[in-house]
Structure formats: C-alpha cells, structure tokens
Image (spheres, helix red, strand yellow):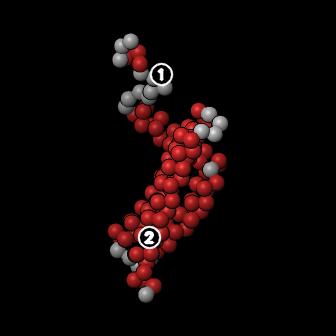
Amino acid sequence: MTEQSRVSEFKSKSGIRRILNACSYSLQGLRNAFRTEHAFRQELMVAVPAAVVALLLPLPALHRLALIGVLLLVLIVELINSAIEAVVDRISLERHPLSKNAKDFGSAAVMIALLLAAATWAVILWPLLA
C-alpha cells in the first residue's frame, strides 16, 4: 500500500479552500455544541457576561486578557471534552472501564480549567475588592 493510498478521502485540500472549509467546520462545531451540549451553554452563559465585565473593569490590558483568556480556555476544554465523549459513544454505548476513564479524564480537564479560571479571577479581582 502506497503512502498516497492511505490518505483519507475526507482529508481536506490545500490553499484557500482548506481555510474556508476549516472555518465552516468550526462554526458548525460551535453551533452543534450550543444546540446539544448543556455544559457548553451554561459555561457560555457565564463567560459572555464575565468577559463584558472584564472589559469594563479598571485593569491593565494584560489582566483583562488573562480574565477573558481563562474563560475561553474553559470553553475550549469543554469542546474537547464533548468531542471525547462523542467519539467514545460512537465506538460503543456499552459500559467499559476504558470508556469511563476517557470520559472521566475529559471531565477532570474541564474541572481543572474551571479552577484555573476561578483562581485567576480571584487573584486579579482581590485588590479591587480589598
């Protein structure tokens, strides 16, 4: 089997078409996550107003970037967790220790991202509240 024959038929082309396809797939992913993932919607409902608050606070630009960045990190990790769960469910819906591990690891990653976000907000906002 040659290297060329092992390339997936779903593999994208190159150039501007690849970039446009990638943008389209990304928007579809965001739409589907919003429609089907409760945790993503909940985190988004916190992230959007919190980002607005971060922009309005009298803070240096890098602090505002950190506050918004950790919110985006939570959403990114949630999307990856949802992708892991979808792949595990696609493979099999039966209970299996490896499937449980994959889902638990993804959930743990979300929890760590949430803790990082909370700690970042606490550290940056503490001087404003004290």
Viewer-proximal residue among 3 and 17: 3
What residue appears at the point 56 percent right and 37 percent down from the top-left corner? 87
Q: Secondary structure at mark 2?
A: helix
Quarter location, residue 96: top right
33 left or right, relative to 68:
right
At label 2, the amino acid type is Ala
- Binning the other alpha carbons within 10 Å of mark 2 as few (below 14), some (14 to 19) or many (20 upward) gives few
Question: Can residue 28 be seen here?
Answer: no
Is residue 47 shown above or below 2? below
Residue 63, picture quadrant: bottom left
Q: Quadrant of the N terminus?
A: top left
Identified at 61% across, 45% down, the residue is: 32
Residue position marked by numbered label 2 in the rendering: 119
Q: Check contact, mark 1 vs mark 2: CB within 8 A.
A: no
- Mark 1: few/some/many CA within 10 Å (<14, 14-19, 20+): few
Left or right relative to 12: residue 27:
right
Q: Position of residue 65 (x, y in %)?
A: 39, 65
Quadrant containing the C terminus is bottom left
Residue where numbered disc 1 is placed? 9
Q: Compared with residue 6, is residue 82 higher up or lower down, i.e. above or below?
A: below
- Label 1 amino acid? Glu
How far across and down, in percent of the image, does residue 92 sit? 62, 34
